[in-house]
Image: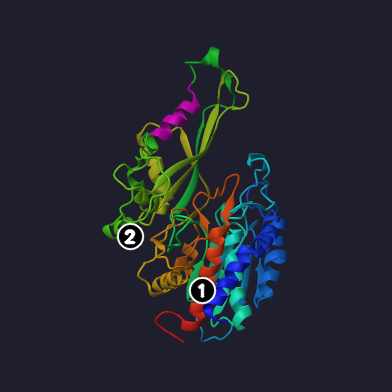
Amino acid sequence: MERTSLLQHASDYASGGGLAADLARLVARPSVSQSEGRLEDLIAYLDQDMRPMLEDIGFDCRIFDNPLPGGAPFLVGSRTEDSVLPTVLIYGHGDVCNGEVARWREGLHPFQLTQEGDRLYGRGTADNKIQHLINIKALQTVIAANGSLGFNVKIVLEMAEETGSYGLREFFQAQRDLLSADVLIASDGPRLTPEVPTMFMGSRGGLSFDLIVNLRPDDHHSGNFGGLLADPVILLSHAIASIVDRRGQLQVPEWRPTSLTPDIRDALRDLPPRRHDPDWGEATLTPSERAFGWNALTVLAISAGNIDAPQNAISGSARATCQLRFVVGTAMDEILPALRRHLDASGFSMVDVLQKGEPFRATRFPPDHPWVRFVEQSIEATTGKSPHLLPNLAGSLPNDVFTDILGLPTIWIPHAHAECGQHGPNEHALLSIAEEGMRIMTGLFLDIGERGAPGVGK
């Protein structure tokens, strides 16, 4: 089948309802890796949903236990056509965030696909089930038309990305030979704008931690003890205010990166800005520089007392869960020690700092690498659009397992958009992006099969 007809066939799969039907089955699987989740659902997603789909198109699949105790499993699928051909590694994660049913608007349910116009609602529609589904179906489209791909493929699916990819690094270390490839081409995160494809070659790192002020085991009457006993909530609030100023600018010197170099600023100069508050973030930076070239602190949650039924009492303790998103050039192992030094110097030695979970490391990959140019040209040929090229995603991904452990160039082509509601209620994908994503990935796989690895040929 010639290219134009094959790309149209890929579009028809999305626009004709095939993608929504397949996605509905995946969304119905409540493969939650957070507090609402069950291990049996994570295993079932790999064994009952993914394995048959991959085996139907010629993949040999194995499911592996997590090398760390209590961790979620992995699936590795391989399709080898000829050992002399290039090998593409594809990654996805089948786990999703907590459903939080009560927070979704009327008429929607996290584990039931609902279509409203261009929007497909459900948990995993954007992050990440639709994204690896598109890539697998694009492979299937090429195989069905041509009988082969013209290259080898390996795919790895994990089930704990939403909890920090627990055990993923240890798994990659142990299975380095099994996962060896020439390039990672994967999909996660959002496009910069819905209308224009995006490519990124790395991601900001992410480290979560608790700030805890624990002054006493019990609450005390606010009348009898007000003005006598220190309020942990007020102390915690002032501690946070010492870390960032009123517009969110970082006050810990070690948290202010030095890697926003002229070449990175040039790469970010012509990008369209995403939605932002003009009086928030580093004042001297553009919105794109803040999102892709700088560090940012977020308070994810804060707790003291009972907000639904407050009592006339001074809390005994207060806790805030915070997160630092950080770029390459930030010493990850020094993030919390630097915070400890800052709090002590600012008079907040009563604030304890406790790391939460496994951090994501920050990565970047050169935008002038031959594989990057190859993919960029393929997307332009398919869509007629020049993709937005980002040095790294604003969010965080386990990209370091591919760059640092496997030594691969990494190229991410997202099939979601920034306002998709991922991690919150009413998560959704845009069918229009999914349709274009099917065309992009089908065209890219055709190009790799016909032209081989960039700089090598067939």
Q: Are marks 2 and 1 in contact (CB under 8 Å)?
A: no
Residue at 38% in and 60% down = 391
Display coloring:
rainbow
Q: Which residues are magenta?
A: 230-241
Residue 325 in view, yes or no = yes
42 on left or right of 421: right
**Residue 62 quadrant:** bottom right
Q: Position of residue 257 (x, y in %)?
A: 33, 51
- Going by the numbered disc 1, the residue's amino acid type is Gly
Residue at 43% in and 45% down = 275
Label 1 packing within 10 angstroms: few (<14), some (14-19), many (20+): many
Q: Is residue 376 magenta?
A: no
Q: Which residue is mark 1?
A: 443
Residue at 38% in and 48% down = 295
Q: Position of residue 16 (x, y in %)?
A: 64, 64
Q: Quadrant of the N terminus?
A: bottom right
Total numbered labels? 2
Q: Which residue is mark 2?
A: 267
Residue 156 in view, yes or no = no
Q: Earlier in the sequence, mark 2 or mark 1?
A: 2
What is the residue that sits farthest to the left in this orientation?
A: 262
Q: Position of residue 164 (x, y in %)?
A: 55, 54
**Residue 409 quadrant:** bottom left
Disc 2 is placed on an element classified as helix
Magenta stretch mostly in which secondary structure? Answer: helix
Kindly report the distance in space between the C-alpha atoms of the residues bearing marks 2 and 1: 26 Å
